[in-house]
Image (cartoon, helix red, strand yellow):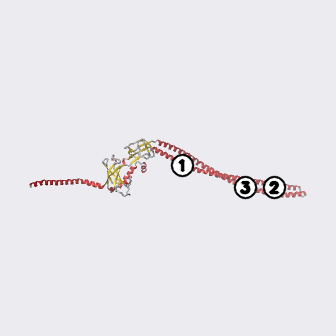
Amino acid sequence: MTQGIHSQGPIVEHQKTSIIARVLGLIILVGILVLLFPIAYGFVEFRAGHSITDDAFVEAQMVHVSPEGVSGRIIRMAVRENDTVKKGDVLFEIDPVTYKDQVAMAETKLQMALTEQKRQKIGLEKLQKEVPLTISMAQKTLELSRAEQAKMSSVLLLTSEEVAGTISESEALVGVAQANQTLAKQEFERFAALYQQNAITLRRAQEVSRTNESTKAELRLAESKKGKALSARTQIEVAGKDLDAAKAATEKAQVAVALAETGNQTILEAEQMLRLREEAVREAQTLLHTAKHHLENTKITAPISGVVVKRMKNTGDSVTMGIPILTMYDPDMLFVIANMEETRLKGIAPGNRAEIHVDATGETIMGRVLWLNRSTGAEFSLLPRNVVSGEFTKVVQRVPIKIVLENIEKTNDIRAGLSVRVAILHGKGDQEWVKKARSLEKQLDTRFDEAENAREE
């Protein structure tokens, strides 16, 4: 019995020790829970108030530099990878010999076009002076011809009237002379018979004889005048021929005026030719400008200020226009693209703040959401989804989100392509900030665009 009592003692002590251990363990567990509760609460609260993704990368606007309008052999590479360049710095140079020849040919064509334009202009000015004078002289000649025709018409009319009057008058005189001669002849015969009968005196007979001879002479004179008057009809024919000649001269003058007026068409043709020459000059100037532009483009310059990150060609390589030779980017325009699952988009809005953990450096930088893409990344996949067959497996889609980095100038180790972990704070967004950020982004995007800057000024 004593042994039984002694055997129960260790059992009781073991039980007491077990209870104490349990109590201490419970106290320690409660302490640990108390200590971990704020951490756990903070973690849960952080996860509940943020959308987090590891599918995010630092990106930049890469500029692929290629020859513009020229091809050839590279004779000089002025930059290497990781070089920092400013806008306008020479990156590489293409052999310019061919393009110098093109400039020389274009200059020769321009000089020829200018010479031809000058010659055409001188000819046009000459025509513009000669044609009006020729037309004026032809018109004056026509006026003189018409005046001469009118004069000849008047002369013909007057001559015709004058000749007709003279003939009528001479015919009347002939009639009177014939009547007088007939009467004188009758008296002569009667008085001659009376004289033979000694019925009249010799003197009277002589007077009658003289009167008879006188009337004969008057008749001959009247007939002579009539003949002369009839011969004057040739003057009418001459005047008619003069009138015909005047009409012919008038017609000739009209033709000359018409021919002279065709000089206006010649002027129009010359003006058209001058315009063609001017167009040829402009075309030659354009060709010369293009040739000079191509010659200038044999020296390829940096379109922006930035860093050369990739060089695909070396000195001596042949290059083709449009094929990139090197790639560069502006370090001030780095940003983050976070591909967020579609199930975690709730609570994300433009303007929300984001924490960006950079895997390469271990540091955390801040940023803000600029926009959420209107399409998912799957829309741009090389292998588009095909769900027509019926074998469909639902895959959570990801939406690209652009995040603008804050205080990027203080972080020199951030490079394009680095992996980051992004946590976006949920909220309603900030449209005022988004508006300002977009405006600033536009300024950064166009600060090297001289034409855009000129328009803004």
Q: Is residue 264 left or right of residue 209?
A: left
Q: Nearer the viewer, mark 3 or mark 1?
A: 1
Q: Is residue 148 visible?
A: no
**Quadrant the N terminus occupies:** bottom left
* Residue of label 3: 160
Closer to the N terminus: mark 3 or mark 1? 3
Closer to the N terminus: mark 2 or mark 3? 3
Secondary structure under the numbered disc 3 in the rendered image = helix
Residue contact at pointers 2 and 3, CB within 8 angstroms: no
On residue 402, which mark appears?
Answer: none
On residue 219, which mark appears?
Answer: 2
Q: Is residue 277 left or right of residue 77?
A: right
On residue 276, which mark appears?
Answer: 1
Q: Disc 2 and disc 1: Cα gap in Å?
A: 86 Å
Secondary structure under the numbered disc 2 in the rendered image = helix
Residue 38 in the image, given as x and y percentages of width and height: 25, 54
Q: Between residues 267 and 239, which one lies in front from this camera angle? A: 267
Above or below, 200 against 408 in this view is below
Query: Could you tell me the amino acid type at mark 1?
Result: Leu
Q: Between residues 347 and 86, which one lies in front from this camera angle? A: 347
Quadrant of residue 325 within the rendered picture: top left
Query: Could you tell me the amino acid type at mark 3?
Result: Ser
Tell me what residue is drawn at x 83 percent, y 55 percent.
Answer: 216
Q: Is residue 333 left or right of residue 35?
A: right
